[in-house]
Image (spheres, grey):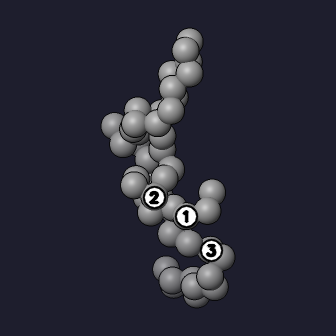
Amino acid sequence: MATPPADGFHQRLHRVTPAGLSVQTTQTAGMSRVEALSGKTVGSVDL
């Protein structure tokens, strides 16, 4: 299988499993939030 060319838009796809979720995010009473995509978990920027 050939590797597609990098074009600055299409980036590597990250699969985040339940074990990779983080609860280190702002919480609201009555809700439970988890963080999957962030700079800390997958290096994302400007989401």
Q: CA distance from mark 3 to mark 1?
A: 14 Å
Say what secondary structure mark 3 lies in: loop
Query: Residue 8 is drawn in which quadrant?
Result: bottom right
- Label 1: which residue? 45
Mark 3 or 1 closer to N-term? 3
Residue at 51 percent of width and 61 percent of height: 44
The picture places residue 42, in percent across and down from the top left corner, at 43, 58
Q: State whether residue 11 is above or below residue 13.
A: below
Q: Residues within 10 Å of mark 1 (few under 14, many from 20)?
A: few
- Label 2: which residue? 39
Q: Residues within 10 Å of mark 3 (few under 14, many from 20)?
A: few
Do the numbered discs 2 and 1 sit on residues whose CB atoms are within 8 Å?
Answer: yes
Residue type of the residue flagged with mark 2: Gly
Residue at 45 percent of width and 58 percent of height: 39
Q: State whether residue 22 is above or below residue 8.
A: above
For the C terminus, the quadrant is bottom right
Q: CA distance from mark 2 to mark 1?
A: 6 Å
The picture places residue 16, in percent across and down from the top left corner, at 44, 47
- Label 3: which residue? 10
